[in-house]
Amino acid sequence: MKKIIFKGCGTAIVTPFNENGVDFEEFKKLIEFQIENKVDSIIVCGTTGESSTMTLDERKETIKFAVKTVNGRIPVVAGTGGNCTSQVIEFTKWAESAGVDGALIVTPYYNKTTQDGLVAHYSAIAKETNLPIILYSVPGRTGVNITPETCKKLSEIENIVAIKEASGNLSQVAEIANLCGNNLNIYSGNDDQILPILSLGGLGVISVLSNVVPNVVHQMTYSFFNGNIKEAICAQINAVPLVNALFCEVNPIPIKAALNMVGYNVGTPRLPLIEMSNKGKERLKKELSTFGLIK
């Protein structure tokens, strides 16, 4: 059995911005809200955290701030991926020195690579760090899928412990579970597939939805783990309209709008992402109201 970084709900936390850069005062509020509402891990500087438009210094300061603020209460996982292996190694080693509990490493994008290249890429990174690594497969964004056979090869590396599976392909998830068994923990990367992936042996979710309802997502996962399957299914089904609204435009455009609507001030996404459309905002307001998050 591979090391478990967390079980349940890990929030892919938003990075609040203001005119000066990262708004750390607001970021602290978000982190405390997550912990108060029973989230099981914080994932910082991932896709939802807009790491791709942050400077290296901003990413480092944000990760250090998260580690300091969380102060060991729950695990902190840092997004350290990129499309240059040597730079990913350097940044992952830095994140380890900063005190994170794990690294979430997305597949290389734009230059992409073959499946053998993925094995070489992740193997080279794992060799240079003691951090437990979560593979991140999100072909809709990167153009690269981690196949089940590649997962099997990578699962044989001691500190590659899990995968965030965001392909949307449940048959692929089942095959990964079959090939890797206890050698690779599986997290859902899609909020509309939490229960299906848990039913295939998944350990939880790395969630966008939990930015606004961390208690709901945490409880959904633990209802399942505790055998309250009907309750878990109801929670998943009830969340579908809000999840759909949160992904009706490119993530993290809607989740930043949602957080602003419920009373935070996280700013707008950085270009090339833009503020949510008025049509999207109306849809989002309706679903937030249905959930009782706004009037």
Image (cartoon, helix red, strand yellow):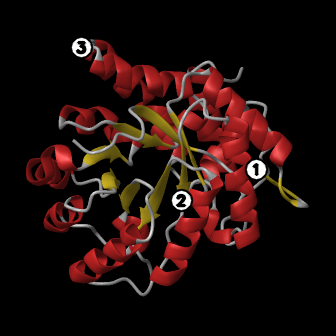
Q: Amino acid at mark 3?
A: Gly
Q: Which residue is mark 2?
A: 79
Foreground: 26 or 150? 150
Secondary structure of the residue carrying tag 1 is: loop
282 relative position to 249: left or right: right
Question: Which marked residue is nearer to the observer: mark 3 or mark 2?
Answer: 2
| Disc 3 crowd, CA 10 A, few/some/many (<14, 14-19, 20+) | few
Q: Which residue is mark 1?
A: 16
- Taking the image as drawn, is residue 250 in sight? no
Which of the image's four quarters has the C terminus? top right
Residue projecting furthest to the bottom: 111
**The quarter of the displayed image where residue 128 is located:** bottom left
Marks 3/1 in contact by CB < 8 Å: the verdict is no
- Taking the image as drawn, is residue 133 in sight? yes
| Marks 3 and 2, how far apart at CA | 32 Å
Q: Which residue is mark 3?
A: 227
Mark 2 and mark 1 lie on one chain; the one further toward the N terminus is 1
Mark 3 and mark 1 lie on one chain; the one further toward the N terminus is 1
Secondary structure of the residue carrying tag 3 is: loop
List x then y, in percent, for residue 9: 45, 33
Which of the image's four quarters has the N terminus? top left
**The quarter of the displayed image where residue 269 is located:** bottom right
List x then y, in percent, for residue 51: 62, 64
Q: Amino acid at mark 1?
A: Pro
User: Which residue corresponds to the image point at 54% horizontal and 80% vertical from the top-left?
Assistant: 87
